[in-house]
Image (spheres, helix red, strand yellow):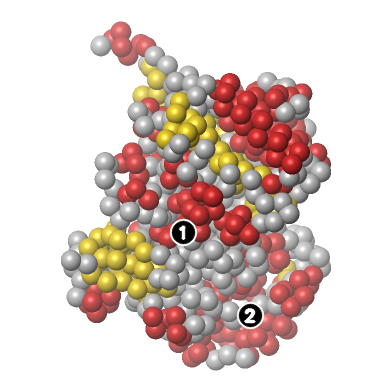
Amino acid sequence: MLGVETLAEVRKAACPLNCWDSCGFNVTIEQDRVMKVEGDPEHPITQGKICGRGRMLETRTNSTQRLLHPLKKVNGTFEQISWKQALDEIAEKFKEIKEKYGTTAILHSHDYANNGILKNIDQRFFNCYGGVTELYGSLCWGAGIEAQKWDFGNAWSHEPDDLYNSKNIIVWGRNVARTNMHFYEKLLDVKKQGANIYVIDPLFNATAKIADEHITIKPGMDGLLAAGVIKEMLRLGFEDREFIEQSTHGFIDLVELLASVSLEKLSEMTEVSSKVMTKLAHVYADKPTATYMGLGLQRYTNGGNTIRLIDALAAISGNIGIAGGGANYANLQVGQSFAFDELTLAHRRNDHRKFSIMKQAEEVLMATDPEIKMIVVTCGNPLTQVPDTHVVEKAFSTVETLVVIDQFMTDTAMLADYVLPAATAFEEEDLYYSSMYHHYVNYGPKLVSSPGEVQPDLWIWTQLAGRLGFGEDFNFSREEWLEMTLKPLKEKGMTLEKLKAQHTLELPVEKIPWHDHKFQTPTGKFEFTARQKGDLGHLTLAVPVESKWENPELAAKYPYHLLTIHPMRSNHSQNYHLLTAKPKVKVEIAPNIAEDLGLENGDCVRVWNDRGEVKGFISILTKAHPDTINIDEGIWKRFGGSVNQMTSSRDSDNGLGSTLYDCLVNLEKLD
Ligand SMILES: Nc1nc2c(c(=O)[nH]1)N[C@H]1C(S)=C(S)[C@@H](COP(=O)(O)OP(=O)(O)OC[C@H]3O[C@@H](n4cnc5c(=O)[nH]c(N)nc54)[C@H](O)[C@@H]3O)O[C@H]1N2
Ligand SMILES: Nc1nc2c(c(=O)[nH]1)N[C@H]1C(S)=C(S)[C@@H](COP(=O)(O)OP(=O)(O)OC[C@H]3O[C@@H](n4cnc5c(=O)[nH]c(N)nc54)[C@H](O)[C@@H]3O)O[C@H]1N2
Ligand code: SF4
Ligand SMILES: [Mo]
């Protein structure tokens, strides 16, 4: 055994997954093979603990299901071809399309499956090519980011350890124990020290179990709950007058809005008692109170307004810019630390067109001048992840040429004309960060060789650039690329060399954002009314489109509210095919639905609406808001998915977010 042990080596690395936590890893390697992925105990935030998705990266890397060679679809079946043939043919298409239709006849459809900074080089490629049709908005966090830009001028959060300064912590629509495990660890810690934790969520999730109080709410109604709490704070005289008078704009509009509705009406609509609203008014007044919002609560047609009303609550209670407070949603300061312009060369494009990420499929089908002739997919699986799957499938299967770069034969790859096999994170060097939670950047070295003919995305772009005549724009070593991204940090003493030696570096961010009350809005103040947005800039009491208040007929036909939250053991669609041979669709229902329909655990059911249907097996939740159903997102079509058969491609009130959870359905038992 001794001989075997000496062959193994433990190297520090970083998690590449699109996740709040951006963990540091210790990876065991033996004979050019990843053996085990564990947490790095020396990482300042993640401190040696990682989740199952991180550990599964070993399985993903070593899986026999990996794509190993370039593939081309010929007469409906995939044939293995050489890289030379694949790249020559794809480059030829690029040239032909540019000549005949213009560069925007190509759509770049992508998401952020890998947080490596060099993954953004695909944008450099498309810009140097001349500028293609790109996506705007985000399925993930778009409505909330835009909302905070209107209110504060930017979306910044407090540093993780500021939690130790909070007296009260409101976890608002964030499934912390499942999606943000190091924040959960800290919550356990501060709870021991006496902080009070409140969880506001339609589902009684694992975080609710450790809360002092779980507040259940009708999905999509959180803005109205915040309005009720503000109303109570004003009635009780709890508002921070000094902050409101000196550092905010548009307070009078908010007061007028709240005068137009009674607390009883807000209670009826949110399905939260007015007593709870009064209680929360006391909690917000008992400073410092920190608000930690999740992304679940803004995936609604009223999502931007929801986040803005919660921001307003944090503001009027004087919890902005103070230690232990904050309206914490995301932390764009992290991403803003790097040199993206230099990496992506946006100025090089001559032509440009933008499609909404939510409605990309409809836009492809409707596009004229020019029509979309080719779609290139990177770091995404739109067939399972983009709403309204039927339309997505139609658009992606009718386009003349579909190129998918991925590690596995996903639902999207199945439709492709060319599938190019991409490396995993352990097979290439990169820097990893996340703008969601903490402010450390991690270094991920290349640890093992790729199997088969697999190549990193960067190699693919470099090869194509060479064939298209802008190879010199890609003539850099990995080291040079990485140094390019770190340029703005160099003067602060943060170099690639230092990062490689320390494996992680703390980025220079504001730890307590807005402590000087200087906001990045047009007025320089916190804006209850976003001055430059006209009518849209006013707060409203909007509710989800798919609700009995907006659409009683639809609600009569489809009485249940469908959530499709993030799965425990997979990052979106990435792990289901590796977890078991036959993953099952689990339909979680509130106890009242089981009672009303006489359902038992394990019953086979159909869930449907006008857009589509999914079949699965019942699991009755012990506690959940009445009439609520959840099916975790991410399941592939071949396993009975995707839940996005039923979701809508509408966008949020501010145009930049998805409305994935704004979804009514019906449910019936099958024999
Ligand atoms: N295990 C796991 N972790 C992940 C991911 C994953 O796929 N799997 N994905 C990562 C990514 S990309 C993201 S964006 C984050 C997302 O992280 P989260 O925001 O934590 O996750 P979501 O699943 O989007 O939803 C979070 C919570 O919102 C609640 N919710 C839904 N609608 C409402 C509402 O109207 N009001 C309130 N108050 N609550 C509501 C849900 O019940 C759920 O508890 O997670 C990251 N971490
Ligand atoms: N119904 C519903 N839908 C949702 C959500 C929801 O909560 N409910 N959540 C939304 C959210 S928050 C998000 S962030 C999106 C996520 O949407 P996606 O990012 O499309 O989802 P993933 O399943 O992570 O798919 C990423 C694909 O990229 C591949 N990949 C991984 N690493 C690399 C790489 O380095 N290079 C290349 N070329 N490919 C790689 C993976 O193998 C995988 O097939 O989904 C959204 N869709
Ligand atoms: S998925 Fe998130 S929590 Fe899990 S190891 Fe990666 S960064 Fe950490
Ligand atoms: Mo996301």
Provide residue 563's location: percent of width, then percent of height. Answer: 41, 65
Provide residue 617's location: percent of width, then percent of height. Answer: 25, 60
Query: Which sits in the foreground, 154 or 281?
Result: 154
- The quadrant of the picture occupied by the N terminus is top left
Whether residue 14 sits left or right of residue 469 in the image: it is left
Please tell me whether mark 2 or mark 1 is closer to you in this view: 1
Q: Name the residue located 58 percent from the left edge and 41 percent from the top edge.
A: 401
Residue located farthest toward the top when viewing the structure as drawn? 3
Provide residue 641's location: percent of width, then percent of height. Answer: 37, 54
Question: Could you give the CA–CA distance between mark 2 and mark 1, rounded to whole angstroms?
Answer: 33 Å
Which badge, 2 or 1, comes first in the chain's sequence?
1
Whether residue 594 sits left or right of residue 166 in the image: it is left
Q: Element at badge 1?
A: helix
Mark 2 residue type: Thr
Q: Residues within 10 Å of mark 2 (few under 14, many from 20)?
A: some
Q: Residue 403 has which mark?
A: none
Q: Residue 390 has which mark?
A: 1
Q: Residue 540 has which mark?
A: 2
Whether residue 437 sits left or right of residue 493 in the image: it is left
Provide residue 304's location: percent of width, then percent of height. Answer: 61, 68
Q: Element at badge 2?
A: loop
Q: Name the residue located 42 percent from the left edge and 81 percent from the top edge.
A: 555
Q: Residues within 10 Å of mark 1 (few under 14, many from 20)?
A: some
Mark 1 residue type: His
Tell me if residue 507 comes above or below residue 297 in the rendering: above
Q: Name the residue located 51 percent from the left edge and 48 percent from the top edge.
A: 397
